[in-house]
Amino acid sequence: DAGITQSPRHKVTETGTPVTLRCHQTENHRYMYWYRQDPGHGLRLIHYSYGVKDTDKGEVSDGYSVSRSKTEDFLLTLESATSSQTSVYFCATQDRGGDNEQFFGPGTRLTVL
Amino acid sequence: LAKTTQPISMDSYEGQEVNITCSHNNIATNDYITWYQQFPSQGPRFIIQGYKTKVTNEVASLFIPADRKSSTLSLPRVSLSDTAVYYCLVGVRFRDDKIIFGKGTRLHILP
């Protein structure tokens, strides 16, 4: 498995505060993804990156921003957290994009009070 | 991006063969069919991928008919540890389309 870590693994925060989640990979994969998973909605793509400084929006990008200044790190920022952003967040990486296998991290459980 | 339809949930018993069918009527010529498995409190993991006919690995088999408008994931002799959510993805494109996992099929294996 690709070495993918996410930090923090659990976080509780208050509405209106900024939150940054970090995804770190050791496999030198070019593509990285942030998903959120909520009951009844399955896995939904927030943002993705196809290289350093190259990112694009997924289907649920409102309220989120991302940055990728190094190949190994992909940051997800909630500028002003809301209760609707309470979720489990997964990071994934992929070597060659397209239909190729994605490798997922262990997830971050975020609670916004 | 080809839309997929799969059952929301399924129950089966230990030792049985389980087949989960996914419909993808508007699959494109270049699209592959990919299945992921997700255990509780973990991220999804890749199980199998195919383009046509049959693909088999140590975990599962994937059957794809000639028209490719559907596919069936087959899990032989399931155990309790196969309880998971299974996602069918078709035609994942990067920069062209959005990657959509959908809600998957929640498989519950009973003793």
Image (cartoon, rainbow, N blue to C red):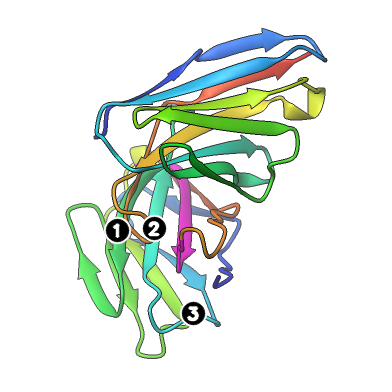
Tag 2, which chain? B
Q: Which residues are magenta?
A: B82-93
Which one is earlier in the sequence, the residue at label 2 or at label 3? 3
Q: Which residue type carries mark 2?
A: Trp
Q: Is residue A63 shown above or below B49?
A: above
Tag 1, which chain? B
Relative image position of residue B98 (x, y in whole percent)? 57, 58
Relative image position of residue B111 (x, y in whole percent)? 40, 40
Residue that carries the numbered disc 1 in the rendered image: B48
Local crowd size for mark 1, using a 10 Å CA cut-off: few (<14), some (14–19), many (≥20): many
Element marked by disc 3: loop
Q: Which residue type carries mark 3?
A: Ile
- The span from disc 2 to disc 3 (Cα, nearest Å) is 15 Å
Q: On the rendered structure, is A99 left or right of A22?
A: left
Is any part of residue B39 visible from this angle?
A: no
Q: Residue at x 61, y 56 (%)?
A: B8
Point out the frontmost of discs 3 and 1: 3
Q: Residue at x 55, y 82 (%)?
A: B26
Q: Nearer the viewer, residue B108 or B71?
A: B71
Tag 3, which chain? B
Residue that carries the numbered disc 3 in the rendered image: B27
Which one is earlier in the sequence, the residue at label 2 or at label 1? 2
Q: Confirm whether the magenta stretch covers residue A81.
A: no
Q: On the rendered structure, is A41 left or right of B18?
A: right
Element marked by disc 2: strand
